[in-house]
Amino acid sequence: MHKNVVRSLVSAVAAGILFSTSAATMAASDSASSDITLSFTPTIEIAEVGDVVITDPALGTDAVASEDFCIGGFGFPTFSITFESNDGINDNVFSLSGNGLDVPYSVGFDNSTSGTFTAVNAGQAVTGQTRNAASCSGSDNARFQITVANGDWQTSDVLNGTSYTDTLLITVASE
């Protein structure tokens, strides 16, 4: 009986070795791949644009004021910006209206808050501006300047009025 137990044990060990060897050599495998894409829908925003008030400019000087604001976005490297006089006349000039008169003004744009202003034409896009921020979170990164030439505001007709207004429409577009 002892022989039978030894034979059975040897047979079981041999079968186990054969099974484990067969399982390792007969294992199946498969693979698959996945392409990963990160994409953005272009988004652009303009924020923090405030009103511009020029009060009592000094005689003999141009009436000048500027306003800082923010342009943000992602999904594009450059943008364009267009300034228009939203006075309802559909013309291509910047003008303040009041007291039955129109007083011309000019607009300058700076794609920073410390550079020089570039003169813009009403209704014509200033293109190729580098995007400076992904979002507007309270930090200004651009500005515009309003200038009313001394010769245009310091006239007897204009000085007889009290105030002259316009609405400046600013449009930004991704490029």
Image (cartoon, rainbow, N blue to C red):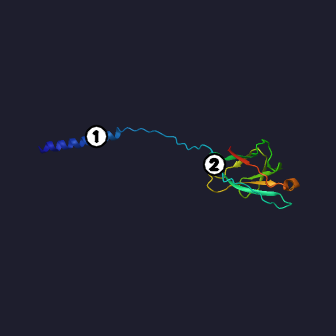
Give 65 or 71, whichever is nearer the viewer.
65
Asked which secondary structure carries label 2, the reply is strand
Q: Residue at 71% across / 57% down in the picture?
A: 113
Query: Residue 70, can we see it?
Result: yes
**Residue at (78%, 59%) from the top-left corner?**
55
Q: Residue at x 71, y 54 (%)?
A: 51
The mark lying in front, picked from 1 and 2, is 2
Q: State the image coordinates of residue 112 (x, y, percent, origin top left).
A: 71, 55
- The disc labelled 1 sits on which kind of residue? Phe
Q: Residues within 10 Å of mark 1 (few under 14, many from 20)?
A: few
Indicate the amino acid at tag 2.
Gly
Q: Nearer the viewer, residue 112 or 144?
A: 144
Decide if residue 157 is on the left or right side of residue 123: right
Mark number for residue 19?
1
Q: Which residue is mark 2?
A: 73
* Percent position of residue 106, x then y: 80, 51
Q: Quadrant of the N terminus?
A: top left
Q: Position of residue 61 (x, y in %)?
A: 84, 59
